Image: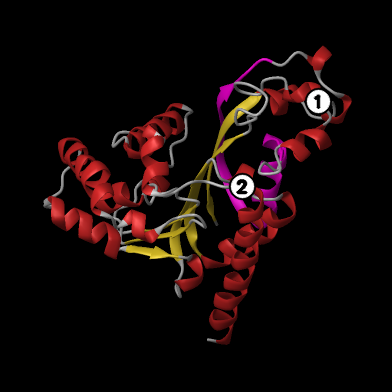
Amino acid sequence: MFRKYFLQYEIKDFLNKLINKLRSKQHWNYSIKGILFENKNINPLTIMDRFERYKRIIKNSGQNDLNGLCVKNKSVYELGCGPLLGYGPFFNFLGSKLYIYDEPFLNQNTLRSHEIKELYFLPLFEELKMNYQNNFSSDEFYESTLSNSLNGIKNFNDQFDTFISNSVIEHIPKENLMQLFEEIYKKQKKGGYFLHAVDFGSHGKYGNGFGNMYSHNKKRVFDKIPALNLLRKSEVKEIIEKIGWKILSTIVYRKLPVDRKKVDRSWSHFSDEDLESRVVLFYGRKL
């Protein structure tokens, strides 16, 4: 009993500190105007297509254990869900038990606005209805999506099943990532799964993909892009495994050629695979 109480506030305090740190380094506009400006945010196909694509990639890699990709009757925790609850509405339609999320920039007034309901949630419902079986009405889908979503793992006093993130891990400061994962690991059920998609690119700061990022000193790159931790594939893999999770599949989804002759010496200790891996899927479970 005491341990559960302690973990609740240990995670709360740590996440609050980390969120404040992230706020000082990166800024996303999650107002209605900001969301509508980024058309990808309200495309009802984005979340569904992404998850199904990742599922196919993992299956086609030869991975036989796909249980972690089934969310029916599962509690799912998403780290960094974006402005519109990320995978939450999709998983709710598929029958998830509870969706828990941490997103420091999410605006509840925007999320629950009439504009977002009409422009995103209802079109999403129509797409999901055509692709999956469910007896939801549009209003039931909308209301249950909001009511079955819990803001903050710190507010969840049980253990969840599935841990998921998309293009988030690369934004968490290196010095905080290990500690954050340790706290999340404690809150996950034994046998639970995880799926992380990590974008190792320069996020447009040095051009498309990596651009010319590797031709610059790594410290100077970090000074220019403090919102990225600049960890590479092998480093993220090592952290995940050190926490105690078992990686079932590490899949380089997208890679780009890198000219070693143009790589600054501060990056030279990385392998070719580390430098070329642009988007990587890490799939596994807690044993």
- Residues packed near mark 1 inside 10 Å, few (<14), some (14 to 19) or many (20 plus): some
Q: From this viewpoint, which residue is outermost toward the bottom?
A: 2
Instruction: State the image coordinates of residue 188 (x, y, percent, origin top left).
Output: 51, 63
Find disc 2 in the rendering and name its residue.
Answer: 26
User: Where is residue 9 shown, x and y percent of the image?
Assistant: 58, 77
120 vs 264: above or below: below
Type of the residue with mark 1 = His
Residue that mark 1 sits on: 216
In this rendering, which labeled residue sits more in front, label 2 or label 1? 2
Read off the magenta span. 230-257
Query: Tag 2, which secondary structure?
Result: loop
Q: Residue at the front extreme?
A: 33
Q: Is residue 10 above or below residue 95?
A: below
Label 1: which secondary element: loop
Q: Residue at x 68, y 61 (%)?
A: 179
Please rate how many residues cluster around mark 2, counting C-alpha atoms within 10 Å: few if below 14, some from 14 to 19, many from 20.
few
Earlier in the chain: of badge 2 and badge 1, it is 2
How far across and down, in percent of the image, does residue 193 sit?
A: 48, 52
Horizontal relation, residue 125 to residue 57: left or right? left
State yes or no: residue 236 in magenta: yes
Which residue: 35% across, 34% down?
46
Query: With 137 as the anchor, is 238 left or right in this view?
Result: right
Residue 16, x across and y down, in percent: 60, 67
265 left or right, relative to 19? right
Depth order, front residue of 44/178 = 44
Seen at 38% across and 43% down, the residue is 33
The residue type indicated by label 2 comes to Gln
Query: Is residue 5 located in the magenta-colored stretch of the structure?
Result: no
